[in-house]
Image (cartoon, rainbow, N blue to C red):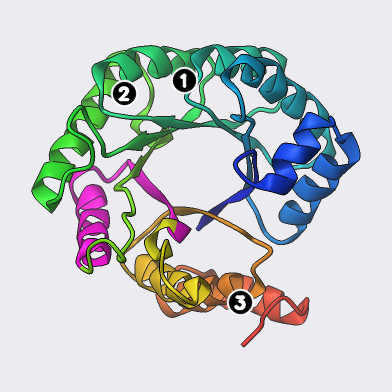
Amino acid sequence: MLIVAERINATRKPIREALERKDRDFFIQEAQKQEKAGANFIDINAGTEATKEVADLRWLVEIIQNEVNIPLCLDSANDQALEEALKVYTKEEVMINSFTAEESRMKAVLPIAQKYRAFVVGLAMGEGGIPQSVDDRMKLADTLVKAVDHYGVPREHLFIDPLVVPIGTDQNQGKLFLETLHAIPEKYPAVRTICGLSNISFGMPNRKLINRAFLALSVGYGLHAAIIDPLDVKLMSILYGSEALMGRDEFCMNYLTAFRSGCLND
């Protein structure tokens, strides 16, 4: 599974404060810690203020990209911020997070993804918000796939997020997500799936327990990528164990490597 490391997000107070003071060393250390913990992409969100996001996202890309060996995921709904950040981006791979099935968002983001040959996250959400059935979410998945085809973005570059809604608002949301997660690759084998995992536990006590259980279930249902905190050792341990059990870890090498390096925690 691909791990998109979520910690550099300006909605978090320590990140917002470090961004305001332009603490270069803080961000480099944060990115390197996440890479060392097993991340495959470093997600970067600079969206504290619309007037500052263009410059801030570009600045984060410039200081972080050469300090890690893995690519970045540019997390922004600001098309200008994405363009300016990608102008200075030098790595071969990049991910854009994200666009919805709304016509305006597809027109804004997909030409950028095509231009820079980026991976792109598509959300199963349209003009009416998040659908409350598998069939309706699949209709939006159809729209996302048709859109990348239209704009010349390879299906292999599309990650669809079926959208995680907190079970605290509706106990059926976890099941709905998992069933949609299973349906997407059955219909579109080239398309991969992704999610912001921790949304499932919002408003619940002992959130980490719910997140870990949900990760194990999501691996079983075929999730390809997760936006998570790789510094959560127990969560990562669940991931290694789940992938080994599901036959997604050849010769259990990832699990064994993590064990030998002391990265597993029971």
For label 2, count other residues whose C-alpha is less than 10 Å away and answer few (under 14), some (14-19) or many (20+): many
| Span colored in magenta | 172-198
The quarter of the picture where residue 70 lies is top right
In percent of width and height, residue 212 lies at: 48, 73
Residue at 55%, 11% in the rendered image: 80
Q: What type is the residue that disc 3 sits on?
A: Lys
Can residue 193 be found in the magenta stretch? yes
In the displayed structure, does residue 50 sit left or right of residue 31?
left
Crowding around mark 1 (Cα neighbors within 10 Å: few <14, some 14 to 19, many 20+) is many
Earlier-in-chain disc, 1 versus 2? 1
State how far apart marks 1 and 3 are (Cα): 34 Å
Asked if labels 2 and 1 touch by Cβ distance under 8 angstroms, the answer is yes
Front-most of residues 193 and 257: 193
Q: Nearer the viewer, residue 183 or 134?
A: 134
The CA distance from mark 1 to mark 2 is: 9 Å
Q: Is residue 186 above or below residue 241?
A: above
Question: In the drawing, what numbered circle is on residue 113?
Answer: 1
Going by the numbered disc 1, the residue's amino acid type is Ala
Quadrant of the image containing the C terminus: bottom right
The spot of residue 81 in percent (x, y) is 59, 17
- CB atoms of marks 1 and 3 within 8 Å: no
Give above or below for 214 relative to 27. Answer: below
- Secondary structure beneath disc 1? helix
Q: Which residue is mark 3?
A: 234
What percent of the width, then of the height, locates residue 221? 30, 65
Please tell me whether the stretch drawn in magenta is mainly helix, strand or loop.
helix
Q: Determine the secondary structure under disc 3.
A: helix
Question: Secondary structure beneath disc 2?
Answer: helix
